[in-house]
Image (cartoon, grey):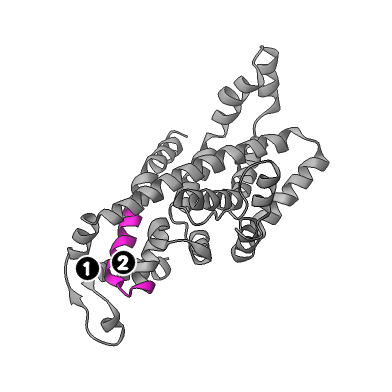
Amino acid sequence: MAAALGYPLTWQVITSLQEFGLAQQFGQPPEFVGLQNYIQLLTDSYTWAVVARSLIFCLVCAGATMAVGIALALLMKRVTKVIRNILQIALLLAWAMPVVAAMTVWIWLFDWRRSIVNWLLTQAGLDFQGYNWLAAPLTFYLVAAIIVIWMSVPFVAFSVYAGLTQVSDEVVEAAQLDGATGWQRLIHIMLPMIRPVLAIVMLLQVIWDLRVFTQIRILQDVGSVPSETNLLGTYIHQLGTGSGDFGMSSAVSIFMLVLTLSISWFYVRRMIREDGAA
């Protein structure tokens, strides 16, 4: 663990305190600049715009993923075995599909020249003929959110369903006999009993959605302005691989790590407290 995780993190911290550009890649010794990269990062309005976009995108995707995943888990709990197996196979196929292959299909669905989505909307009487979903930042993030949620829902659905199978049927039936509605049984009995599962799944989902990269990068390559659609992951890639400024790229990476830990700390502290009480 120290070799696999500790060394890259240490390298990032050291590089973030240096001026490490193209010249350093060809052998020139890096210049130590202290906290200059972090000062530039914190005073750059564009960086804060990227952070705001990333946080909004992360929270929207994580919240929607949890909602859809819980709904599918409840559906699998209620339907017959045959339908449940069909749902599980469909979710497994969506989850197992390679990202690049899935992105190829999604790009075709939203392509402005031959998009089936545009065709369906046009058939419904809306003016979407030749509409480019990736040109405007708002619709770009809408498409990206749909893709990210679609790829993340299976994990949430399976995790929550596994938790629901451990909820005692006797407790739920007793509440039903006492007059509790289905919504009341869900909110006051079933979800509280699987709270540890929901907490860890939500924590992982927030972390994954905050550092999303592949989907955004591929959509940018298809046809959008990266400066208008960058999230933290693609911004770090642009600074490092794109511009060769690995010092600044490392500083943004460390900032992203601190941001992730700050957001996750509430859930981590809550889980530690619950484990201690147990």
Between 215 and 28, the one lying in front of the other is 215
- Residue 78 against residue 58 in the figure, above or below: above
Between 77 and 51, the one lying in front of the other is 51
- How far across and down, in percent of the image, does residue 107 sit? 61, 60
Magenta span main SS: helix
Q: Is residue 204 left or right of residue 252?
A: right
Q: Quadrant of residue 239?
A: bottom left
- Residue 147 against residue 159 in the figure, above or below: below
- Residue 169 against residue 117 in the figure, above or below: above
Question: Helix, strand or loop at disc 2?
Answer: helix
Residue type, label 2:
Ser
The residue beneath circle 2 is 250
Q: Quadrant of residue 269?
A: top left
Q: Residue at x 63, y 60 (%)?
A: 113
Say whether residue 173 is magenta.
no
Mark earlier in primary sequence (2, 1):
1
Between 138 and 39, the one lying in front of the other is 138
- How far across and down, in percent of the image, does residue 205 sit? 50, 48
The residue beneath circle 1 is 17
Residue type, label 1:
Leu
Q: Please state the total of marks drawn on the protein image.
A: 2
Q: Residue at x 74, y 32 (%)?
A: 78
- What are the residue bounds of the magenta stretch? 241-258
- How far across and down, in percent of the image, does residue 257 sit? 35, 56
